[in-house]
Structures are given as C-alpha cells and as structure tokens.
Image: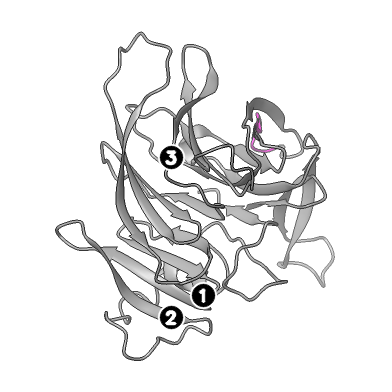
Amino acid sequence: QVLASCSFDRTAIVWEEIVGESNDKQRGQSHWIKRTTLVDSRTSVTDVKFAPKHMGLMLTTCSADGVVRIYEAPDVMNLSQWSLQHEISSKLSCSCISWNPSSSRAHAPMIAVGSDDSNVTYGGKVQIYEYNEVTRKYAKAETLMTVTDAVHDIAFAPNLGRSFHVLAIATKDVRIFKLVPLRKDSSSSAPTKFEVQVLAQFDSHNSQVWRVSWNITSTLLASSGDDGCVRLWKANYMDNWKCTGILKGDGSPVSGQPGALSGVLGSATAQSALNGSCLNGCSDPEKTPYLYKRTCFILMMFC
C-alpha cells in the first residue's frame, strides 16, 4: 500500500507500507517507510490526491499559492522516483482537489479545484480543468460562478457509465452540481464546455461544511460540519435529494430524524465521515473528529 501526505511545511511525502523484517521480533509486522519528499511548492500544500487507477500511478497536489501539480511514478516498483508532469496555475489559493474517476474514453481526465481565497474580485471558487490530447496540457474548462464562498472540500461522484458528471461541494452549505458536457468539434483543441445544473443545495448544518464524501455507487453523500453532525443525503426516483439521516459525532443517530439509518451506518461513506476521514483517509487530530484538516492523508491499494 502507498500513502501520500501533505503539510503546511510546503511538502508532500509518499510513504510505502512494508511487511516483514529480518528481525524475528518484527517479522510479519508492517511499518511505513518514507519513499520521497516532493518539494516543488513554495507555500503550504493544502491537499493531495492519487489519480484514478486507470491513469497509472499519478499524484496531484494543490498549494496555497494557487498551483496544482501532477506527478507520475514511471516505475511503480520504485516509489522514490517521481517526475513533475504538469503545473496548473490558478489565480486563487487552492484548498482542495478532486479527480473525475470516470474511466470512459469519452471523458478526458478532469480535475476539480476548490478555493478558500478571500479575494472577492474573483467570482467562482470552483474551477474545472480538463486534459487536452492535442496540446497535452490541462486547460480550464469551466468555473462554477455561483460558488462564491470558501470551499473546504470537493468530490466527484463515481461515474458508473453516466454521460454527465456529479460534483459535491462543501462550503457554507452542501451543494451538488450536475455537469453535462456540450458537444464540440472533435478536432478542436478547446476544452469541453459544460451545462452546469444545481441538483441540490442544503444549509441544514447551519454552519460551515467541512467534508463531503460519496459511497462507491454515488447514491449516498455524507457531509460533516461545525454543527457536530454527519448528514446523509440520498436522491429518490425523481432525482430529488433528501436527508436520510443525521448522526452525532460518536456515530449515534439523532433521535426523531427522518430516514432509516440501519442500512447506511455500516457504509464506508458514513463510517469514514464519522471517523473524521473521507474515503481518501483525511483526518484532523487538532479539531473535532468531523472537521476538515488541511494536512491530508490518502491511501492507495494496489490490486
């Protein structure tokens, strides 16, 4: 297994789990070894994410100076060597990133970048970047202009063969967007444009929302906020999103709330949110367990 961490010390570190030692006392036990330190950022590294597996072993970081960097390990057996493949410059301080997990050839690799920049002269705090096969670079495809408050977390939903994309955003409330690609000339080098639709917007936390996380089938979204609760959201057959349950920080359901929680309490989405970690393993030891932490850890398992 491989772990990546990022920190205010302007670095991102790649770790590898090693099992077994020559020492009899440690034989069969696992421990983590630091394989490399990425030092390209000049400011705090605020988020780090592995790319979807079908893209190979790639790692993305974003920094407070507004730069998104994409690294690749040419040899998966040598995790000490990572090369910087792309740098994406944003005009806003970056706070979080999310890869579009779609493996369809109809969808180019895509990254959503969220910002907590306080500069009001820039409108949308969420930008979508798409890889162009012609230029072999990432270009801005869309800006969500309606998101004007600080963005703390962002998450693409698993695609599951859809022709459109679904994006959840944690800001002063919970927002779910639908991104429908518009047709373009196949020979054009311009990035794809999207029809942006707001599927849902919830202010039920009555406070800042710090984390959003999807389940593997993208049918359930968990959000956590300063109200000390994890809220679970689900769409009905008419694609209307409703709250299906509310959980306290200790995992117990809030009495008198709608929705049966027994079916979702054991899900990875609910449990990771309760434990203060999203599906990528982010955690915050300094704040209460359900809050967002700028120092994030992500875990990748080789199958």
* Amino acid type of the residue that numbered disc 3 sits on in the rendered structure: Leu
| Among the 4 quarters of the image, the one containing residue 40 | top right
Marks 2 and 1: CB-CB under 8 Å?
Answer: yes
Residue drawn 64% across the image and 76% down it = 288
- Residue 269 in picture, x, y percent from top left: 43, 66
* Nearer the observer, 180 or 202: 202
Judge whether 198 appears above or below 206 on screen: above
Numbered circle sitting on residue 247: 2
Q: Is residue 36 magenta?
A: no
* Nearer the observer, 141 or 204: 204
| Among the 4 quarters of the image, the one containing residue 196 | top left
* Amino acid type of the residue that numbered disc 2 sits on in the rendered structure: Leu
Can you identify the residue that label 1 sits on? 274
State which mark lies toward you, 3 or 2.
3
Cα–Cα span, label 3 and label 2:
30 Å
* Amino acid type of the residue that numbered disc 1 sits on in the rendered structure: Leu
Question: Is the magenta region chiefly helix, strand or loop?
Answer: loop
* Nearer the observer, 174 or 287: 174
Q: Is residue 72 magenta?
A: yes
* Nearer the observer, 91 or 236: 91
